[in-house]
Amino acid sequence: MVTALLLVRATSADVLPDDRADIFYSKYSGGGMDITGKSVLVRKKVTENLAVEANYYVDTVSGASIDALSNASVIKDERKQKSGTVEYLHDKTTYSLSFINSAERDYISNTTHFSLSQDMFGDLTTLTLGWSYTRDQVGENEGSAFLPNVKWLGHAESQSYDVGVSQILTKNFIAGLTLEVITDNGYLANPYRQIRYLDDTPLGYSLASQVYPDTRTSTAVQGQAKYYLPYRAAVTGSYRYFRDTWGVTANTYELDYTHPLSNIWIFEGRLRYYKQGHASFYADTFPFADSQNFMARDQDLAESDNNTIGAKVTYAFLPDGWKIFKRGTATLDISRIQFRYLDFRGALYEPLATEPNYHFDANVFQIYMSLFF
Amino acid sequence: MTRLSPVLHLRPLALAGLLLLMSGCAIQPWVKPYERDRLADPIMAWNRDAISAAYLDHIRESREASRGATGGAGGGCGCN
């Protein structure tokens, strides 16, 4: 749900990355929702040691997910995200400071992020440390999509601490390990979700507000490794373990294969599998009203798994440069994600307890162009 | 028999740590700079496209309970 973070990046020190400008378009369709995203990013070195970056992102949401549909009207909303980053390189250390503002009609989020990245041991090892602070303002649209009436419900605060190591192991092999701890407090529930509990009404159940704890701490550890094959291609594997104080545990596995063709094309295929257990206070149906201190029926907290298959192709153009540009790339990326819920029923049409567990497929399409100068 | 004080017990450990640190400072890179052409190939970058990576993370964080340690994410709610 709510995480407003950063642009942490394990920048390899010594030299700041190239200046670049990107334009980006994306479309997500699935689970009754269509989300269109547009983004522009510009990165420029002011001196050899100092770079600035600005990013503007807009996404437009239409439709609503299954559980929002159970108790709300169709939604149309827009989210605008602005971020600015300053990076400073001193010897083998890169310092990065970012500010991110994300605004929706019913949700405002501000994040400050600081990280430093240090190359050591003959530049074989890169250590990255990061910290961020986020403050969110959470609201609910009690009006309609076209005549909004936002009621502000409260604030949520979040702090994140991360440490990462990237290690060159051989001339063909690099590995990385990242640990991130995030703590939240404040209004952490999703106001658009409701629980249902059994009663004597003709439907057999009624709806009520969710009750969430007002604190949460999560820990995630990710290990990844990348290997350059005997021919010019690379394979990447990663695994992430996650757990939090709400009782959720999750495992993520990812495999990626990258294959260039001459110096013009790069083809990439990826597979991802994700599985999570439910939160301790989640239930699809509660036995009676106020049966627990904390109650949730948010599909994000249900037991679920999903798998992704994706393909990406990058075309390099302007190999000899043009005017101020050194080179350019155009990329098309398509993914299909199958979401499956194991204890969340699609409570829209069927009588209670006969509804099948909910599942849906989503298609994600991205096209973007990058110019390096 | 004379017993070593706890501080003296720690001495060999501290010495070993110091030696390790000193040897760490003197580590010779076992992959020489001129052997890193493959590692410098763009296909070996952890993440070539920041916007795309942040976008995919945002989609996942809006649909999954887990978060963090992926190296990037977006902001906002994903409430709908």
Image (cartoon, coloured by chain):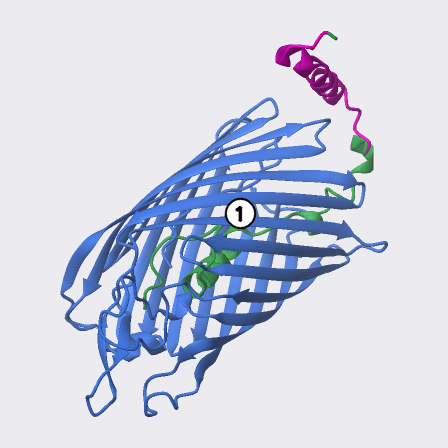
Q: Quadrant of the C terminus of chain A?
A: top right
Chain letter corresponding to the colour green: B
Magenta stretch bounds = B2-30
What residue is shown at x 44% (from left), y 36% (from top)? A131
Label 1 amino acid? Gly
Direction from residue B45 to residue A369 in the image, left or right: left
Q: Quadrant of the N terminus of chain A?
A: bottom left
Q: Is residue B7 magenta?
A: yes
Spot occupied by residue A351 in the image (x, y as percentages of width and height): 32, 92
Q: Is residue A234 magenta?
A: no
Note whether residue A335 is visible: no
- Helix, strand, or loop for circle 1? loop
Furthest residue in direction right, as rendered: A230
What residue is shown at x 84% (from left), y 56% (from top)? A231
Secondary structure character of the magenta stretch overall: helix
Can you identify the residue that label 1 sits on? B71
Task: Name the image quarter holding residue A195.
Answer: bottom left
Q: Nearer the viewer, residue A315 or A207?
A: A207
Spot occupied by residue B16 in the image (x, y as percentages of width and height): 74, 18
Chain letter corresponding to the colour blue: A
